[in-house]
Image (spheres, helix red, strand yellow):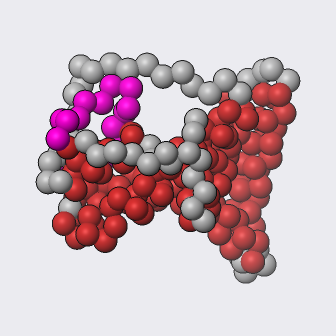
Amino acid sequence: GILATGTGACMGVRKDLWKPLCPADDCDFTTPLDVVSQGYRVAFAPKAIAYDIPPSSIKNELKTRIRQTSRNFMGTLKRWGWRGWVLHPCVSWSILSHKILRWLTPFFMVAAFVSTIILYDKSGFFRFVLLAQSAFYVAAISGYVVEVMGERVSFLSAAFSFCIANAGMGLGVLKALVGKAPSRY
């Protein structure tokens, strides 16, 4: 009873619960919010199978993350509002803990890095943390270089994928906040 998302490729919705979508809405997120806001719940069907084609390049991965995040973030702000938070606290917790905090992770990462730089001289702990953060970002940059060369090194590629996904989510949140969610794929 706390699901707030679906997968458009295999989502079924009662005809009387479906609401028209704006060009910038994402059915994976907006339609389930519409269903819950009408007093119904979103149910998971474990036997439903859908296939998706992942982005084929770094550029497409970034564009996909920006598009998905901006649409979903904007959809949450427009469709859910304060009424949803009050009337459906469990679903709201699910949205906050599984979506909104994840979309805000890039901002937390920047804040953590800047804070660590500011606190660098305070103790050996912060020197270690800054070294660890820097090593991670060097690994991500190295992962990018390796990817461009057509190779994959698991840790480097994972660090790069994490950073590119978060960069896309950060840009998506910013686009949503200024009302610029892309209206086409």
Q: Which image quarter: residue 56?
A: top right
Residue 31 in view, yes or no: yes
Which of the pair 5/141 is nearer the observer? Answer: 5
Queried whether the magenta region covers residue 132, the answer comes back as no
**Residue drawn 79% across the image and 36% down it:** 144
Q: Which x, y percent locates residue 69?
A: 53, 49
- Image quarter where the C terminus lies is top right
Q: Which image quarter: residue 75?
A: bottom left
Which of the pair 100/136 is nearer the observer? Answer: 100
Q: Is residue 85 left or right of residue 70?
A: left
Number of numbered tags placed on the structure image: 0
Magenta part mainly helix, strand or loop? Answer: loop
**Residue drawn 31% across the image and 71% down it:** 82
**Residue drawn 21% across the image and 51% down it:** 36
Instruction: Report the magenta residues as a range.
Output: 1-16
Up-down: is 34 above or below 126? above
Q: Residue furthest bottom?
A: 122
Up-down: is 176 above or below 139? below
Q: Residue furthest left?
A: 39
Up-down: is 155 above or below 175? above
**Residue drawn 75% across the image and 77% down it:** 118
Q: Which x, y percent locates residue 103?
A: 52, 55
Q: Is residue 114 left or right of residue 90?
A: right
Which of the pair 86/105 is nearer the observer? Answer: 86
Q: Which image quarter: residue 130?
A: bottom right
Residue 106 in view, yes or no: no
Which of the pair 175/142 is nearer the observer? Answer: 175
Q: Which x, y percent locates residue 95?
A: 35, 55
Q: Is residue 82 left or right of residue 78?
A: left
Q: Which x, y percent locates residue 10?
A: 33, 25
Q: Is residue 96 left or right of residue 123?
A: left
Queried whether the magenta region covers residue 11, the answer comes back as yes
